[in-house]
Image (tube, rainbow, N blue to C red):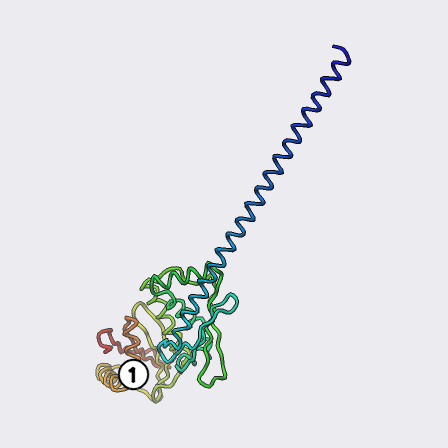
Amino acid sequence: MSNSIRLLLLCSFILFFSCDNDQKKRTEALRQTRKEQKEKLNQRANQHYANLDRELVQKMVDGENSKCPQVMGGGMMITEVSLEDSVMAIYCDCQNPNMVKALNNGLKDDIRQSILLSVCQNDDDVKKMKLLKKTDTGIAYYFLTPDKKQKHLIYLSPEELPMGIPSQQTVDSITRVMFLNNLNADLPATIGQGMVQKKASLDGDDIILMIECDESVIDMDKLINMNRQNKQAMLEAMHSDEQGRAFFNAVKGLNCNIIYRYYGNNSNKKTDIKFLKNELK
């Protein structure tokens, strides 16, 4: 094969390779352009839907605010609901002394659990929680004390918002724990001459109140022997007292029995006075 033919073939190969490489570059550039265009369209679509979702959140918040003032129950009133950045802010006047006491005694986690149980009670609530979570919107509760001097904040992040209606078992379990924590926040407490209530605990369906007896004042043998008479006297006293009735009703609402467990501060002597659920009425 002559040199001229070889040179011609080589030039043809180089030209073919160069054309093929240019085609590949053009194809890749076209793919990249289409990819960028698709990404821009997706971004626009996502922004459009995000704006629609934010409008739905604003509409939901405006709807809640239009209902104000809203009675929450238990001496609390929602006075305003507003959308502040990425937070649904709920302002509450707190006239409930027990709630104020719980807030001041560091029981915010219990109150948070109670709120988490209450914000998702039906299918409409579930839709609201899903919308808030989708738009990365949290909920902030501001509790204003009666003297208007303190404002307690309880914040629910979007991640912890419930996505379903809680089961009755979950409600009962958490409510019982909160009830005990509230009781223990006031203990120890003197409840009579020589008697100090030390602690409240839960054993199955029994709420147990531990009461230490000063044996220099109280005869444990006599207390044990008079167990039945003491129970009847306590039952009558609790039913005739407004706070006593409220306490019994609260325990009954938890579907619990209640045990008053008296024990001597020196001896191992003890006695229980137990009220079954059906007696708490």
Spot occupied by residue 243 in the image (x, y as percentages of width and height): 31, 84
Q: Residue at x 27, y 78 (%)?
A: 273
Number of numbered callouts drawn: 1
Above or below, 125 against 43 in this view is below
x and y percentages locating residue 153 in the rendered image: 48, 74
The kind of residue tagged 1 is Gly
Residue name at image x 37 percent, y 70 percent: 177
Q: On the rendered image, what quadrant is the C terminus found in?
A: bottom left
Q: Quadrant of the N terminus?
A: top right
Q: Residues within 10 Å of mark 1 (few under 14, many from 20)?
A: some
Residue at 35 percent of width and 87 percent of height: 194
Question: Closer to the camera, 169 or 273?
Answer: 169
In this view of the protein, which residue sits in the foreground, 176 or 136? Answer: 136
| Residue at the spot of label 1 | 244
Q: Residue at x 35, y 78 (%)?
A: 74
Judged from the image, the secondary structure of the residue bearing numbered disc 1 is: helix
Q: Is residue 112 above or below residue 15?
A: below
Quarter residue 16 falls in: top right
Q: Quadrant of residue 70?
A: bottom left
Q: Which quadrant of the structure image shows residue 253?
A: bottom left
